[in-house]
Image (tube, rainbow, N blue to C red):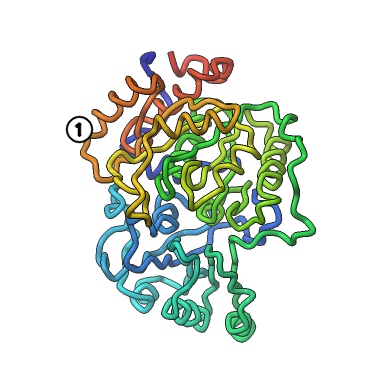
């Protein structure tokens, strides 16, 4: 790979700052979430920093809409949220419960965000009672689960009696307004890159966010399109919770959203956040992303330290090579690079994995969180050299 020069890009030692600023040129059509910063407490009991806490983890690293005041997780109470994620301290405390979170807040938070993504997609009995407790205290609810609380009579009544609102992030538009695939994706003349993975909850959204910011820093105008609830809660201006859309409309809804982003922003690149994995039997969203986005290239995220698919102990992780082959067979695209999720790995392990996979796959490999974002930029420019003129003098 060519030598990288980084005169403008922030240091990779402060990735939380990079993520925090990402996606600022990116609208979620039809969403009633105000485009301003609101204070929020994030609930992530027993899961913060873990796989099922990915919504809370993502909000701590990047949130355009919400000022996160604290995280609720009694198992990690007293710790700094940034430190738990392996980042720099960020002065966001982890609290034992809602009472403690409210006690340390300077004023009543505007929102209580459910920060977990359990495989059931539903609230437990305790979590229902806690959300109702927050509403009774005058706090609005942000719900990213498959269970739509506005449709629940008890929650609907709590909204009225406490003058609060519930944002059901995953709820799709009315079926009569859903769009089928039209072929208009061919009118999108900018490059489209999908960030896919070999498993769910593997860091696709984080890598997509860092890549978007890094390309913008280098002068290549880039817009991110979110496809999951966490990205929408974080503040992605364009996106849809794809796994809540009826399958007949998935590729069409994504296509239409990409077209909207292209027409409104006129970007050089559109980055599409991935979901699940094409090879994963429990999820089909990757196939709809490949069909609806028709990407020119794919960045693949892999966790070498993960032996089995998360939530499926008897299902071994696929190899990157097998996933690359599947993606390139399924879709008219190419995998332009591999990114590493370094969970359960040392720095030496990451170095070894990068060298090994580059040799095996013949594509650039990096870790978006522990290596310079310039490597991600070069990964893209090496495959689409016409974009180098956008960053003249910044990468040699």
Q: Label 1: how many residues lie within 10 Å, few (<14), some (14-19) or many (20+)?
A: few
Q: Which residue does the image show at 76% across and 35% down from the upper left?
A: 184
Q: Nearer the viewer, residue 91 or 378?
A: 378
Position of 84 with respect to 117 (left or right) is left
Residue 21 appears in the rendering: no
Residue 316: image location, x then y, percent: 34, 45
Quadrant of the image for the C terminus? top left
Instruction: Tell me how many marks there are.
Output: 1
Q: Position of residue 287 (x, y in %)?
A: 58, 42
Q: Residue at x 34, y 75 (%)?
A: 97
Query: On the image, which quarter does residue 79 sit in?
Result: bottom left
Kindly give the residue lying farthest to the right in the view shown: 176
Quadrant where the N terminus sits is: top left
The residue sitting at 44% across, 34% down in the picture is 323
Residue 98, by quadrant, is: bottom left
**79 relative position to 301: left or right:** left
Q: Secondary structure at mark 1?
A: helix
| Frontmost residue, 112 versus 187 | 187
Q: Nearer the viewer, residue 122 or 240?
A: 122
The residue at the far front in this view is 314
Q: Is residue 63 left or right of residue 30?
A: left
Please tell me whether residue 243 is drawn above or below residue 107 in the rendered image: above
What residue sits right under mark 1 in the picture?
Answer: 348
**Is 322 left, or right, of 178 in this rendering?**
left
Q: Residue at x 71, y 31 (%)?
A: 188
Is residue 65 visible from the viewing direction of this image? yes
Above or below, comparing residue 238 to residue 97 in the picture: above
Q: Nearer the viewer, residue 69 or 136?
A: 136
Q: Position of residue 120 (x, y in %)?
A: 47, 66
């Amino acid at each position: 790979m060519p030598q990288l020069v980084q005169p403008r890009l922030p240091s990779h030692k402060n990735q939380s700052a990079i993520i925090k600023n990402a996606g600022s040129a990116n609208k979620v059509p039809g969403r009633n979430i105000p485009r301003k910063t609101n204070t929020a407490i994030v609930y992530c009991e027993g899961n913060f920093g873990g796989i099922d806490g990915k919504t809370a983890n993502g909000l701590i690293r990047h949130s355009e809409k919400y000022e996160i005041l604290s995280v609720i997780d009694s198992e990690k109470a007293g710790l700094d949220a940034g430190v738990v994620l392996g980042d720099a301290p960020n002065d966001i405390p982890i609290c034992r419960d809602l009472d403690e979170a409210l006690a340390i807040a300077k004023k009543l938070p505007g929102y209580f965000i459910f920060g977990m993504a359990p495989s059931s997609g539903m609230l437990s009995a305790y979590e229902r009672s806690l959300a109702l407790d927050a509403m009774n205290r005058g706090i609005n609810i942000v719900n990213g689960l498959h269970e739509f609380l506005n449709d629940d009579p008890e929650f609907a009544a709590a909204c009225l009696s406490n003058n609060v609102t519930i944002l059901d992030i995953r709820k799709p538009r009315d079926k009569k307004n859903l769009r089928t695939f039209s072929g208009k994706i061919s009118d999108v003349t900018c490059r489209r890159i999908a960030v896919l993975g070999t498993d769910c909850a593997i860091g696709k959204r984080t890598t997509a966010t860092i890549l978007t910011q890094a390309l913008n820093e280098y002068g290549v105008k880039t817009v991110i399109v979110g496809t999951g609830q966490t990205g929408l809660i974080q503040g992605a201006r364009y996106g849809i919770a794809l796994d809540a859309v009826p399958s007949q409309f998935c590729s069409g809804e994504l296509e239409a959203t990409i077209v909207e982003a292209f027409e409104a922003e006129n970007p050089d690149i559109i980055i599409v956040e991935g979901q699940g994995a094409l090879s994963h039997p429990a999820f089909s969203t990757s196939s709809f992303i490949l069909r609806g986005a028709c990407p020119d290239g794919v960045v693949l995220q892999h966790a070498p330290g993960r032996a089995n698919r998360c939530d499926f102990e008897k299902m071994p992780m696929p190899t990157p090579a097998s996933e690359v082959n599947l993606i390139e067979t399924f879709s008219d695209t190419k995998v332009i690079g591999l990114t590493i999720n370094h969970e359960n790995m040392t720095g030496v392990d990451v170095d070894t994995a990068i060298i090994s996979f580059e040799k095996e796959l013949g594509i650039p490999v990096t870790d978006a969180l522990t290596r310079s974002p310039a490597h991600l930029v070069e990964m893209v420019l090496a495959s689409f050299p016409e974009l180098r003129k956008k960053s003249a003098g910044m990468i040699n």
